[in-house]
């Protein structure tokens, strides 16, 4: 196992300790969350979980973790997920796994959103690429308007459609201010959701660097 994989595992196991019997838990997507599922399974907790991707749901069920439809759960005690970038002011970039729309809905529905990352995910400032999910309807028109509106390239990613049928693109231009960029993307008709997560969504970031674990309080 690489050092980065070790750090992901350590951060995930640390974050799993916030989960208690009886909780409703939102589960993210990706390699770091895979370690979280292992940690939760080891504890044999009585919890109700909702997954943000088919892959996470299948893995959770295989490990004996109770998963339910989001249709029967309207809030979470905690949601736990990874991130591609974390800035000092707690802006996140997510969407490397093309599930950022579901991940943002789950994070927004949680009392606490805990982010788990290895040390490489901490950045001085947010940079491209910024994942964006678009409706298939009018896709070419939306890309043209986004490119003009954002004053930078928007490139279709060579991946399958999202879990809900959206097309994944990446904004690859300069990111001067994440808040301004997020607002500009959201204001473009045809956009389903983008991968910029604002600090108001984040409760804490659990970072593993080597064998050291740090809890960064985003609410302080």
Image (spheres, grey):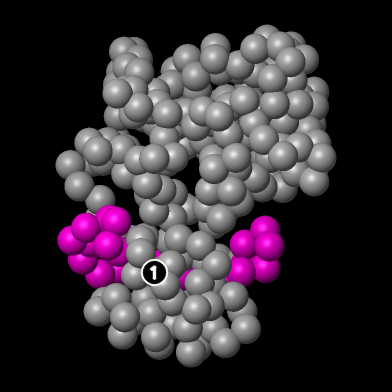
Of residues 186 and 7, the one nearer the viewer is 186
Left/right of residue 162 with respect to residue 13 in the rendered view: right
Residue bearing mark 1 = 185
Asked if residue 32 shows in the view, the reply is no
Q: Kindly identify the residue that appears in the image at 50 percent across and 78 percent down.
A: 189
Of residues 150 and 59, the one nearer the viewer is 150
Mark 1 burial class by Cα count in 10 Å: few <14, some 14-19, many 20+: many
Q: Kindly identify the residue that appears in the image at 54 percent across and 40 percent down.
A: 107
Left/right of residue 173 with respect to residue 167 in the rendered view: left
Q: Kindly identify the residue that appears in the image at 55 percent across and 29 percent down.
A: 111
| Quarter containing the N terminus | top left
Which of the 4 image quarters holds residue 146?
bottom left
The image shows residue 8, relative to residue 187, as above or below, that is above
Q: Is residue 163 magenta?
A: yes
Q: Which residues are the magenta region?
A: 161-181
Q: Position of residue 84 (x, y in %)?
A: 38, 45
Give the secondary structure at mark 1.
helix
Q: Kindly identify the residue that appears in the image at 47 percent across and 37 percent down.
A: 82
């Amino acid at each position: 196992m690489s050092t980065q994989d070790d750090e992901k595992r350590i951060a995930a196991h640390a974050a799993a300790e916030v989960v208690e019997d009886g909780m409703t838990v939102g589960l993210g997507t990706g390699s770091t969350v895979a370690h979280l599922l292992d940690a939760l399974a080891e504890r044999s907790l009585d919890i109700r979980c909702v997954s943000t991707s088919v892959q996470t749901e299948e893995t959770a069920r295989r490990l004996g973790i109770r998963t339910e439809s989001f249709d029967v759960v309207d809030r979470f005690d905690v949601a736990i997920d990874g991130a591609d970038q974390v800035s000092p002011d707690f802006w996140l970039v997510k969407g490397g796994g093309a599930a950022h729309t579901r991940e943002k809905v789950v994070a927004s529905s949680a009392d606490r959103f805990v982010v788990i990352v290895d040390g490489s995910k901490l950045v001085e400032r947010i940079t491209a690429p910024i994942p964006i999910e678009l409706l298939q309807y009018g896709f070419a028109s939306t890309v043209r308007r986004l490119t003009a509106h954002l004053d930078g390239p928007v490139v279709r990613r060579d991946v399958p459609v999202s879990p809900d049928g959206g097309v994944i693109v990446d904004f690859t231009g300069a990111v001067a201010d994440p808040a301004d960029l997020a607002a500009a993307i959201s204001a473009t008709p045809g956009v389903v959701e983008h991968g910029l997560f604002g600090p108001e969504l984040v409760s804490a970031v659990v970072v593993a660097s080597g064998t050291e674990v740090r809890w960064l309080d985003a609410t302080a």
